[in-house]
Amino acid sequence: MAMSPSRSQLLKIATSLVPTYGFTRETLSRSVLELPKDRAHSEPLSENAVSSLFGSGDYAKKTLIEAWLSEGMTQMASVPSPSLGHVLHARLSYNEPVLHYLPEAFALLASPEHGLPPLDPRPALKHASRIADEASYISGDASTQLSWYTRRASIAAIYSAAELHQFTSPRTAHAFLDSLLTGSSTLKQSVDEVQLFSSYVLQSWKGILQMCIILTLCHGATSLPSTMTEGIGFQSNFSCSHSVVLPHSISEVFTTIGTTQGHERVCRLSKLCTNFELLNSDTVSLPTKAALSDSHVRTLPTSDSRTAEAQNASEDTRTLPRQAFTMTETIPLVFGLFKNDVILNGTLTWDESANLALYETESNNGVQVWKLRTFEEVDVNSTRVSERIEGVCPRWLGYGE
């Protein structure tokens, strides 16, 4: 009788399936299908078997992620020419086949077992430290005592910066790593105090997680059927919705959140917002039977510029106020050494009679967002605000092709 495969054997097989199936329980379940012919199963592992071998729920996914990271250490050691640069480049290359899955994986590692954030910083420290230690060992680094710590702090910072850059610009990640290695003496000075190491890597990881959240939405969410995204101007490939009850009257809430009166204040609540400017305000025409909740109005011509023929048919249309704006979100990366500006151009359009407000933007990297806010009176002094977000994220933003 053939021996049952060990847990470690199945994990190793599962890491090779991640490029196809992601960091999922399905990947773990399918590992038994890839065993040698005389031992391969005819069916994937059951959910109970996956839980028994690898852990229940998301814990099994974390087990797979950790196994994949450990396999990355092994791949680093197989570099033919083991200089520091070659080893770090090899580790970046190891990411490439699964790059579109990594944002969700890193976010999951940093998420607490129960409840809501704060996020756990220990995976960040472990990830950067392991790569720095392994790269130093493979490349024959002979640093001792204090220089041992500062050398590894520098390597960890360099790799963290390059990996974060890889998420946003995979095609230029290796060139970016080279530029950091070339200027590593300058970077080393910024972490030359050993006590700054933990703080430095933690801030780098926070930057990664900020990008993870965006990319997880772009690649982790399932596109809605086209019937649900008709009228918004694009086919959505990420979406979410939520609601909150605010202890204020509907007139106060709608005026502040749903109109131009409070729009700048609401946008500036984001710590990432570094610049905001209200542009021109106008009105836009919609067919009387067309609801703002099923419309895309950001690029429609102003109603003031309609032709005489269209104006003559005004009884079949209605006009809504529209406010154009531009804002800049500055994302600090790697302890503030690098910053990425994202410029959003958009409009806010509202329909007071229907208690609806529509926020539409397009960024300089091609991400479009359609965000509908619905305002509902709960009682005289409380209002429910429901938000539905549809968006499209270009494929190149998540990974190279």
Image: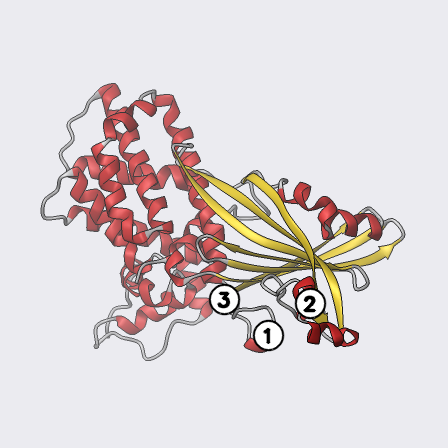
Asked whether residue 191 appears in the rendered view, the answer is no
Residue at 28% of width from left, 66% of height from top? Answer: 5
C-beta proximity under 8 Å, tags 3 and 1: no
Q: Residue at image x 84%, y 57%?
A: 377
Residue at the front extreme, as displayed = 308
Estimate the x, y position of residue 54 in percent, counting from the top left: 40, 58
Q: CA distance from mark 1 to mark 2?
A: 11 Å
* Amino acid at the residue labelled 1: Glu
Residue occupying image coordinates x 30% and y 29%: 153
Compared with residue 155, is residue 115 higher up or lower down, i.e. above or below? below
- Foreground label between 3 and 1: 1
Location of mark 2 (residue): 293
Horizontal and vertical percent position of residue 387: 67, 58
- Which three-letter amino acid code belongs to the residue tagged 3? Asn
Disc 1 + disc 2, Cβ < 8 Å: no
Q: Amino acid at mark 2?
A: Ser
Mark 3 vs mark 2, CA separation in Å: 18 Å
Q: Quadrant of residue 183?
A: top left
Q: Foreground: 54 or 330?
A: 330
Q: Residue 283 versus residue 359: which sits nearer the camera?
A: 283
Relative to 312, residue 341 above or below: above
Is residue 214 in view? Answer: yes
Contact check, label 3 and label 2, Cβ < 8 Å: no
Assign the C terminus to one quadrant of the image.
bottom left
User: Which of the labelled discs sits on residue 81, or is there none?
Assistant: none
Q: In the displayed structure, does residue 68 sit left or right of residue 377?
A: left
Q: Give the colour scheme of this rendering.
A: secondary structure
| Residue denoted by label 1 | 230
Instruction: Name the residue beneath numbered marker 3.
Output: 237
